[in-house]
Amino acid sequence: MQRLAILYDASQAVLSTFDLDEVLSRILGIVRDVFHLDKAAIMLLDGKMQELYVKTQFGWDLAGETIRVPLGKGLSGTAAQTRKLVYAPDVSQDPRYILPVAATRSEVAIPLVVREDVVGVLDCQSNQLDFFDQDTLELLRLFSTQASIALSNARLYSLEQRRRAQLEAINAIARQTTAVLEIGELLEQVCSLILESFGGDHASVLLFEDDRLVLRAHQGRLTPLFKIGDELPAGEGLFARAIDSRKAVVENDVGKVPGYLPGFRETVSAVCLPLVSFGQVLGVLALESASCEAFLPADVNALESVSDICATAIQNARHFDRVRQLAYLDGVTGIFNRRYFELRIAEEMARSTRHGLIFSVIMVDIDRFKQLNDEFGHLLGDEVLRQASAILAQQLRKSDVLSRYGGEEFAIITPETGLDSALAVADKLRRVVESWHFPGVARPVTISAGVAEFPAQGGTRDELVKSADEALYAAKQTGRNRVVTAQMLRGTF
């Protein structure tokens, strides 16, 4: 009777809290203190995988190992499948015993059942043979009933709290993302808000760019296997399933997923959500965790709402970026204008100063352009400008910045490029233009160029551009159709 009274008090203690972790801790504490056991574990049911997994335990020397037991296998799997207590007085003689926990001699597995639904198993083990007598087994069975109710209540309460927090998160994400129109800042904020509101260890956003799926932002504490700007195969892994189905894809043990493409070294659980706006798939939002069973089915609806909000915000930011780009485009040539050049040269100087890098500026001028206009008319002059700018753009790298500086003059920024390399680029441009046949122009069209390097030939914007301009002037004064560097002016040129 005394033991039963202790068990009653223990059951009341288990039922007195709705915090899931606290419930689990109290259940195992009672098992250890009231029944004097060497080791015990609570194994919860993964309904999708039809497996039990160890949620919490004491005395099991797992060394970080994740234990999963299929239904019907082992003593625990058998107890869950049959919904009956299973006892092995001598595990060495029981063929169902499959968990070789050190020193275990006897084991009992009690199903945790609520309204005919199995939520898990209480697995108790002892270092003594036939440790559990009938009274102990009956008390454990009675206690497991109370533990099951407490566990179910805690999970329901946890889900309700989670739903409430998710609704608040959805509203917060909607408010904050609609206020951001710069695409880079938006994607970083999306990753931050997703992690803050939905847990997980890492969030990332991948966007389609010319039919390529490119990693554009990520935040978290996992080890990335890709870097920003890398292309990932859109037709493989969870990405492909999310994109093809246009639905969330949740996997709580990616190691068992055929064809899984890891993005982070420690990922165990992952959810991928397609970013869809007005029927167009913009990319994928991914949330990953180093823990097993990190994402619940109940999370999917909330995450899909978030992905819809994010997709709309991304589309809005892209539209804003296109409109802003129009303000930076030259109306005649279609390339960037001087306003954009001024913006980018300031950014490049700041970046190069911060990281100890160099870059060069190339100033280009079409030779005798006023004479060409007078000879052939302004319409043909504009066409020469368009064709010349197209030629220059084709010969440059994607990272280079080509702008119409004014009239027939162009400015080029070549990031992380020294003077000699920039000289070679400028001379290649000169040779290509010289050999190009411009329809309607009866004579060759040539260019002259001046080159200067930051910070060697200019530590400020004005100094650098002035150095390149002076080199360009020298090129035109000494015969045109040639390239001069600022260094040549200071030397023996």
Image (cartoon, grey):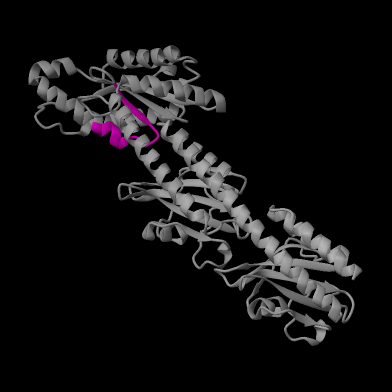
Residue sitting at 42 percent across and 56 percent down?
Answer: 233
Residue 332 is situated, as x and y percent measured from the top left of the image, at: 20, 25
Of residues 363 and 351, the one nearer the viewer is: 351
Seen in the image, is 220 located left or right of residue 55? left
Count of numbered tags: 0
Mark yes or no: residue 37 visible.
no
Mark yes or no: residue 43 visible.
yes
Q: Which residues are magenta?
A: 390-404
Seen in the image, is 368 located left or right of residue 305? left
Residue sitting at 29 percent across and 24 percent down?
Answer: 327
Q: Quadrant of the N terminus?
A: bottom right
**Residue 214 sits inside the magenta stretch:** no
Of residues 220 and 42, the one nearer the viewer is: 42
95 relative to 145, above or below: below
Which quarter of the picture shows residue 27?
bottom right
Q: Quadrant of the C terminus?
A: top left
Which quarter of the picture shows residue 290?
bottom right
Residue 317 is situated, as x and y percent measured from the top left of the image, at: 37, 35
Residue sitting at 11 percent across and 32 percent down?
Answer: 439
